[in-house]
Each structure stands twice: as C-alpha cells, then as structure tokens.
Amino acid sequence: MEGTQRDKLIWRSKEEEAEDKRAKVDIYKYIFGFVEMAVVKCAIELGIADAIESRGHPMTLLELSSALDCALPTLYRIMRFLVNRRIFKEIRDDASVQGSQACNLYAQTALSRLLLRSGESSMAVFVLMESSPPMLAPWHGMSARVKDEGADSSAPFEAANGKDLWSYDAANLAHGQLFNEAMACNASVRRWWKACPWIRGINFDLPHVVSVALESDGVEHVGGDMFDSVPKADAAFLMWVLHDWADDECIQILKKCREAIPEEKGKVIIVESVIEINNDQQKLKEEELKLKDVGLFLDMVMIAHTNKGKERTLEEWAYVLGQAGFIRHTVRSINTVSSVIEAFPA
Ligand SMILES: C[S@@+](CC[C@H](N)C(=O)[O-])C[C@H]1O[C@@H](n2cnc3c(N)ncnc32)[C@H](O)[C@@H]1O
C-alpha cells in the first residue's frame, strides 16, 4: 500500500514537471501573441506577396529588397520570421550563386496568397482593419467591460474612440471604408448574386455605408436603420449582423425582418457562428477545431468592438428566434467559421 502511494506521488510529480515545462514555453505565446499580427501587417504594407506574384516566380532576397525598395538586412529578418511561420516558403536555388553560397528563393504559399492586396480571396484588408489603431485600442479596455457590464461607459470601443463603431465609421469615412472592404473580404457570399442572377437583391445598410457601395447588376442599395424597418423581400439575409447586438436588440431586429417577409413562405437566413461548448474535441479534425477556435476569438472581438454583442450557442439562438416569433428554425454547418440558420415565421 505504502509503495503504491509512493509510486503514485512520483508519477504525479513527473506529470506536473512536464506541465510546468510546457507552461514555461507556452507563456511566450501570450507575451508575444501580438507579434504575428504585427509582422503580417508589415508584410501586407510592404507588399511582399504582391511583389513575388507580379514577378511570376520565386525571388532572391536581393531581388525582393530592390523590388520593395527596402533595407536588405531587416527584410531578411522579416522573411526569416514569415518562413518560420510557414507564411512564405524558402527554396534552395543552386542555379543562382552569390560568392560561393547558393542563394535561396522566397516563394508564395496558399497562406501568403491571402495577403495579396487584391484578388477574390484576398484577406489583406481584413488584417489591416483589425490591426488599425481604432480597432486595437479597445482591447485595453476589456477588463473594464467585464467589471462594469451594463454601464454604457464600459464599452471598450466607445471608451477608446469616443463613439460606438458604427458612429465612429460614419464620422471617419476612411476607416468606414476599410471596415466595409474588410467585411467584403469575408463575404464571398456577395458573389451569390452573380451565381443566381434571377435573384433581385437589396443591399440594406446604414446610409453612410450604402452611399459608397459599388453599383452591381441586380442589386439595389437601400440605406436605413434596421431598428426602424427592413425593406420588404421574400427572404432576409443577415450575415455577421446579429452578433453585434445584445439579445433584446437582436429580437427587435428579427421582429423587423419578420415584418418584412411574407408570413407563409418567407424566411430569415442568418450566417453566424454557433458556439458549441460540450463538443467531443477528440472526434474533431484539426481544421474543425481551428474553425471552432475562430468562433471563440470572434466572441472576444464582440466584447472589444461592440457594446453588447456576442457569439451565440444553439440554445441562445433558439431563445432570440423564439422571442422574435419564429416558430421553427434549422441550423446547418457549412465548414466555415459560420453556420447557416434558417428561421421561418410559419
Ligand atoms: C459586421 S458588419 C457585416 C456586414 C455584412 N453583412 C458582411 O458580412 O459583410 C455589420 C453591418 O451592420 C451594419 N449596421 C449597423 N447598424 C445598423 C443599423 N442600425 N441598420 C442597418 N445596418 C446596420 C453596419 O454598417 C455593418 O455593415
């Protein structure tokens, strides 16, 4: 008996030792967590992916520094970091020799192509928007919001920038444009109108947003306030809108959507994250786990950037939809950060 207890103690302390060791490494992820975002922002601003793309083939450091007109030694360190993070690839090129050394070439990866300044799948503007000073400043006010939940003054974005995000963007049109372009990066869904030309779409948003929206065949731009009314249509489509608001505000918006659609055949289509708390993590593939992580990250973004927004669980979605008078709804996972929820009034 004594021996077993001693063995157990030794075994536990080995496990704890390993945990301590891991913690001492993991802590740096949090100390320097911002570095990855900052270096990726730097890569986008320098136009590293764009330079390699326009050259049409991998480039040496010398070619890259002369194309970007920047200091070779610092660019080398930036590239070393980005290669280490697998954002660019370094490939050996025996054909180009400098002195007695073969020169390595920097090449694109699927990830670096997402950092191109233009192109259908570019996410560059999304990075630039999230790393812009007005979006970064509110992160310092998270603990104040948690402590003073409910007090208007505790909203981190308002505390840092003097106004909520929507009023700030209406007054600072350049930032508003950056925000709208970032949202467009994510909303490849907007191309649905091209895929389904028989659909007549109404792009409904705040007046300062629709006033700068690009003309697009089959899409009518309508400015307004969804808390007052929503344009009449067969279906209302809301992507990444409801997560910006508290439950009572969501219920108001959903009621306006219900008034806008036909009672019998209408539906509201919602594209948002669904937070699953008790999922069996073991059964999920690595990508699925990462997507679930993004949902939790977005939930933190809602704390920092909105007054009372949040990502919702299945139960929380059922609550707001039920309170808004929808009698049934379906939820479909579409293998992205978001799921599709369809809600029916009848
Ligand atoms: C997170 S963005 C999502 C935009 C778009 N659905 C997308 O996925 O690209 C939220 C949108 O809600 C709009 N919005 C905020 N308050 C609004 C209001 N009271 N009435 C109408 N639109 C509003 C914002 O201007 C912004 O475009």
Image: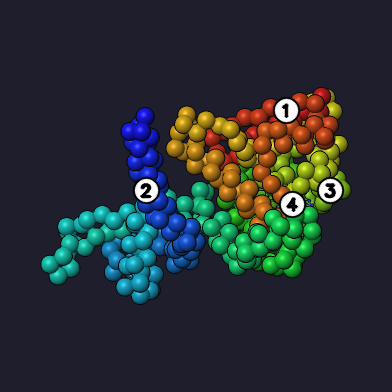
The tag earlier along the polypeptide, 1 or 3, is: 3
Say what amino acid the circle numbered 2 marks: Glu
**C-alpha separation, residue under disc 1 versus residue under disc 2:** 49 Å
Is residue 227 rendered to the left or right of residue 272?
A: right
Say what amino acid the circle numbered 4 marks: Lys
The tag earlier along the polypeptide, 2 or 3, is: 2
Disc 3: CA contacts within 10 A as few (<14), some (14-19) or many (>=20) = some
Q: Is residue 277 above or below residue 54?
A: above
Say what amino acid the circle numbered 3 marks: Phe
Could you tell me residue 317's position as x and y percent?
72, 35
The mark lying in front, picked from 1 and 2, is 2
The mark lying in front, picked from 1 and 4, is 4
Q: Is mark 4 within 8 Å of ligand 1?
A: no
Q: At 62% from the left edge and 38% from the top edge, which residue is drawn?
A: 275
Provide the residue designation for mark 2.
17
Q: Secondary structure at mark 2?
A: helix
The mark lying in front, picked from 3 and 4, is 4
The tag earlier along the polypeptide, 1 or 2, is: 2
Q: Are marks 4 and 2 in contact (CB under 8 Å)?
A: no
The tag earlier along the polypeptide, 3 or 4, is: 3
Disc 1: CA contacts within 10 A as few (<14), some (14-19) or many (>=20) = some
Kindly give the residue lying farthest to the front in the view shown.
Answer: 2
Q: Is mark 2 within 8 Å of ligand 1?
A: no
Disc 4: CA contacts within 10 A as few (<14), some (14-19) or many (>=20) = some
Kindly give the residue lying farthest to the left in the view shown.
Answer: 100
Say what amino acid the circle numbered 1 marks: His
